[in-house]
């Protein structure tokens, strides 16, 4: 089996979501540290321009968005499962709340708390990433409201543990837990949010159980090594599948774009298209050919 190569940076909240799943599944992986903001010269050849963090690489196959990453990890490492009791609907559905609405609230708390301390170039990068302006003064003013919303949402989580269960779906951790965990891990950098979590005793104990999974077994790898691995992996004959009823065909020129933030289009030749995945073949002079995988939900293919 080819190495799991994970491109991330340590403070990345979505990176923490995947790193915690590595720990849960006991996965051995290669860690490639990447810049927190653009430019990312050793990332773009792998992703065709997709700029979000993290990405996962296996040879010349590149998985963008945590949804695509998690799906591939579950396929390769099915035990322990992230979907006990056939809970796929709950896990993926939860992701769309935690990764969008709850995360935007967590991010508003971080920017409202620490915005004055952030380098201007970082704020500018995140404004471009989000597709709109980031007004630190407005976020500071709105901080009490953001904290109120955060408190209301984590109270739902506290109530979900009142019957003594260890995890939200019962005795076994699931994707539902990892969906929530990374947001609280991220927001807790702000003292006011950390106190709100601390005021939830059941949730606080759950956080300790989640942190105990660790991050698996990482070893460092340079971005240069990762690019060379992609370059040497021949995917010229790689074939996928086109789902029934899809109007596009393998080999069509397509563009894939996130529908929320980081809306940078990625172009290539279509390899796979179904309800779960979009995969395209992308070519450049640095790595040759890569197969880039995106989830269908949350991405536009045209």
Image: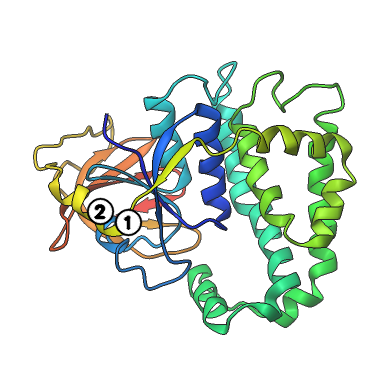
In the current view of this chain or complex, which residue is farthest to the top? Answer: 85
Q: Is residue 86 above or below residue 200?
A: above
- Residue 215: quadrant of the picture: top right
- Residue at image point 38% right, 35% down: 275
Query: Residue 244 in the image: x percent, y percent?
Result: 27, 29
Q: Is residue 65 left or right of residue 19?
A: left
- Residue at image point 71% right, 32% down: 209
Q: Which residue is mark 2?
A: 225
Query: Residue 26 in the image: x percent, y percent?
Result: 49, 28
| Residue density around tag 2, few if under 14, some if 14–19, many if 20 or more, within 10 Å | few
Q: Secondary structure at mark 1?
A: loop
Q: Which residue is mark 1?
A: 222
Judge by depth and name the residue closer to the eye, 187 or 49. 187
Q: Is residue 56 left or right of residue 227?
A: right
Query: Residue 185 in the image: x percent, y percent?
Result: 68, 49
- Decide if residue 289 is in sight here: yes
Q: Is residue 265 above or below residue 93?
A: below
Q: Secondary structure at mark 2?
A: helix
Image quadrant occupied by the N terminus: top left
Which label is found at residue 58? none
Query: Residue 151 in the image: x percent, y percent?
Result: 84, 51
Q: Are marks 2 and 1 in contact (CB under 8 Å)?
A: yes
In the current view of this chain or complex, which residue is farthest to the front? Answer: 219
């Amino acid at each position: 089996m080819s190495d799991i190569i994970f491109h991330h940076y340590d403070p990345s909240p979505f990176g923490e979501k995947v790193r915690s799943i590595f720990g849960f599944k006991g996965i051995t992986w290669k860690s490639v540290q990447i810049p927190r903001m653009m430019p990312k010269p050793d990332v773009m050849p792998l992703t065709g321009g997709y700029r979000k963090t993290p990405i996962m690489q296996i040879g010349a196959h590149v998985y963008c968005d945590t949804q695509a990453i998690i799906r591939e990890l579950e396929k390769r490492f099915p035990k322990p499962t992230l979907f006990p009791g056939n809970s796929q609907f709950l896990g993926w559905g939860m992701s769309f709340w935690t990764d969008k609405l709850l995360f935007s609230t967590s991010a508003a708390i971080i920017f409202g708390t620490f915005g004055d301390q952030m380098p201007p170039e970082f704020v500018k990068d995140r404004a471009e990433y989000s597709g709109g302006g980031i007004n630190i003064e407005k976020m500071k003013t709105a901080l009490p409201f953001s904290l109120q919303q955060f408190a209301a949402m984590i109270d739902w989580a506290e109530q979900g543990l009142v019957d003594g269960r260890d995890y939200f779906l019962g005795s076994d951790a699931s994707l539902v837990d990892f969906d929530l965990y990374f947001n609280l891990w991220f927001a807790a950098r702000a003292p006011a949010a950390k106190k709100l979590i601390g005021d939830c005793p059941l949730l606080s104990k759950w956080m300790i159980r989640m942190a105990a999974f660790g991050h698996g077994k990482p070893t460092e790898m340079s971005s240069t090594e990762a690019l060379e691995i992609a370059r040497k992996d021949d995917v010229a004959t790689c074939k996928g599948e086109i789902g029934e009823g899809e109007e596009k065909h393998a080999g069509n020129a397509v563009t894939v774009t996130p529908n929320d933030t980081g809306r940078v289009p990625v172009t290539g030749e279509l390899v796979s298209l179904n309800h779960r995945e979009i995969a395209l073949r992308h070519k450049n002079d640095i790595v040759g050919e890569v197969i880039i995988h995106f989830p269908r939900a949350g991405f536009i293919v045209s």
